[in-house]
Amino acid sequence: MKSSSRTFRAMIPVSVAALVVLAGCAGGGSSDSDKPNDVSTKVTSKPVTLNLAYTDDPPTNALIDAFRKKHPNITIKAQQTPFSDYVKSIKLSMASSTPPDIAEYNPGAMRALVPAGLIYDLEPYAKAYSWNDSFPASSLEVLSSDKKAKEYGTGGLYAVPGALSVLGVYYNKDLVSKAGISETPATLADFEADLKKVKDSGTTPFSLGGLQVGGFQLWNALTNSLGDVTQYRDWVYGKSGSSIETAGAKEAAQKVSDWVKAGYVPQSANATADSDAQADFVNGKSAYLITGNWAASAIQKEMGDDVGFFLFPQKTADADKIASGASVAFSISSKTKHPNEAAAFLDFMSSPEAAKVQVESGFMPVDTETAVETSGVLADISGAFKSVVEDNGIVPFPDFAAPDMIDKLTAGVQGLLSDKTTAPDYLASLQESWNSFHE
Amino acid sequence: MSDDVTRVVPGRAQVRLGTTTAAVRTRRRTRGRATALLYILPAAAVYLGFAIWPALNTAYLSFVEWDGISPSTWVGLENYRTIFTSPTLGPALWHGLVLIIFFAIIPCAFGLFLTALLQGGNRRGMTAFRVIYFLPQVLPLVAVGITWRWLYSSDGLINQGLDLVGLDGITRAWLGDYDYALIALGLIGTWAMTGLCMVLFLAGAQKIDVSLYEAVALDGGGSIRKFFTVTLPALRGEITIASVITTIAALASFDLVFVTTNGGPANQTTVPGLLVYRLAFNEGNIGAASALAVLLTLMVLTVITLIRLLAREKA
């Protein structure tokens, strides 16, 4: 313990020292250099090599392979960094004198890279390729921000999505039908009635990873159902004067506490990691699990046809579908020598060929029009996703709202789960963090 | 530099030895000092480059506002003000102090107890005991943390054991319990640190003169008397070292907390090291992270000085 924690403390200053040197070399992007010149949708026919930094795979490598088939002269050299180091390393390498041409987008890193002018505002390419038509609007909105990277959903476009994700409810078909439930719930009230039936049949309704992100994703899903979507979106984007202390968010937080008391969420949730919650669900210890499509292939592999997926239900059956979602997205370095070729890679994400890769690797396709054959739970998810996109109902995750929001969300929901924090106190702690970043 | 090296070739120095005058002696002393410095240089350079310079740089960074990329701006004591007014600091420092009980005090006491049991002649299986108790020190704490998370889970081994002896009323997911998480976390530290203390104390006890124990025995003292009269005073040095090492581990703990509770539930197990990490890597606030790191270092130094003063006064 001693030596490793010491090394850790010693490492911060070392990497920090490296940053100083590199930042000095970078010299900062001037304001003219953050939009590409000579924008063209034509790519060269000469051999070109692009470097790409990423952390998520799948889908990145499969997308690169598919792109290569279309443009054999463009070689993409990909460099993967584990997620835990990605934010640090991408900031460093984008600021260096030889940055990768394309980098996987990360909201934490971009808060520093956008103001420094190190990644391109892609607006000219968006116009040239008409990305506003080929990408779902909500998926681009979340990747645009003002020049200070404080407010999202406005200003320039800094990345485009290469694969999309959506949050929903997985259910164990066997356990649910044993509880006497024959169809997926149409409203939140239906869902609560189902939870009671499952509980009465002797099964714990939810597995929940309260130790990590699972806890606040439950609150997030409830807020999407009970709250006002515009208020929520504005708050996450950082629109001036927004607040999360709304009636809907409060009701959602209260429901988290109530569901623990009713026994729908296990007492042990706060000590459960997301992977443990998923393992419990897969092993039939619970009937429901709230998580995203990224877990689909692993869950299907274990459970086969015994698992289904539905969107967390809204208050009324005919309400617009709302669900949180994110994307694996890509940005272009403002120092690249081949901006047009890099942009061609980004444009490729909305192609039918990419859609096939995206679905096969367990993600949602950017181009929702392309029919890709799926079966089982993957078919449930793509159907659900399509209906949310049609209602323009994909909203960002709440940890997007401020750099330290994820800690406030995790700790706050843990307080709700252990009945030590009240719903208003929880929301006040989120708003305090929001205010200190945005105001 | 290379010139110096040729001049201090032993053969030549010896030749001069015969004709030593005061002036030559002084010159040789200077040269000798230069040689000594030259020998120190490699180690000193590594130490300066990787310990002193980063530490000074951290101190400098604690006075600037910096996100890691953009140019930094001098903000004076602003970062320290941020740290001191942050509502998360107080509880984190308190948790660090509580962990001293579990990381330092209990392991030292337990280590002494084991030493008293194991010392004195070659008991059978001595090596086995040493290996078993020292094993936690060898394992990486990240692996230890994940294993303990499972042991502590709602259907883990510890709760199964409690069920078995009829204590099923108190079973819970210990690391997720609002009131018990910090204690559960501390006990992992106790488990990890006890072996280290014991091995240090056993090594110290081996150098105690056996005749001292015989003297106590002649005076009619039993093994408890022997322990308090002979062993305990003889181990003062080892106890100081063990206390210092384990106290640093408690105050500067990070990895164990990071993998077991990550500060949860509801910030009941946050420690200063975890806050440094969050400030630097989640929030990109390098200045405030450095300020907290400086503060933590000062706190560790203060506590260590206190321990050493206490040990000296007793002498």
Image (cartoon, rainbow, N blue to C red):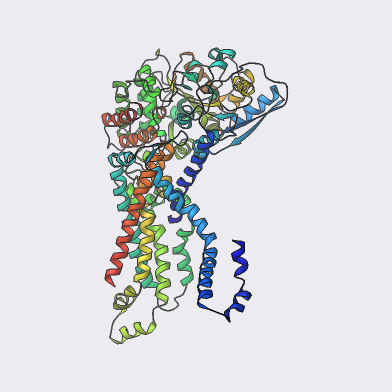
Asked if residue B300 can be seen in this view, the reply is yes
Given residues A11 and B189, the one toward you in this image is A11
| B156 relative to A144, above or below | below
Residue sitting at the far bottom? B218
Position of A306 compared to B246: left or right? right
Q: Position of residue A328 (x, y in %)?
A: 53, 27
Q: How many marks?
A: 0
Given residues A151 and B216, the one toward you in this image is A151
Given residues B110 and A337, the one toward you in this image is A337
| B229 relative to A120, above or below | below
| B115 relative to B141, above or below | below
Given residues B200 and B128, the one toward you in this image is B200
In the rendered image, which quarter contains the N terminus of chain B?
bottom right
Residue A354: quarter of image: top right
Residue B88: quarter of image: top left
Residue occupying the point 38% across, 23% down? A238
Position of A162 compared to A201: left or right? right
Q: Position of residue B111 (x, y in %)?
A: 37, 66
Residue occupying the point 29% across, 61% down? B306
| B203 relative to B84, above or below | below
Q: Position of residue B32 (x, y in %)?
A: 53, 70
Asked if residue A201 can be seen in this view, the reply is no
Q: Position of residue A200 (x, y in %)?
A: 35, 31
In the rendered image, which quarter contains the C terminus of chain B?
bottom left
Residue A148: quarter of image: top left
Position of A11 compared to A408: left or right? right
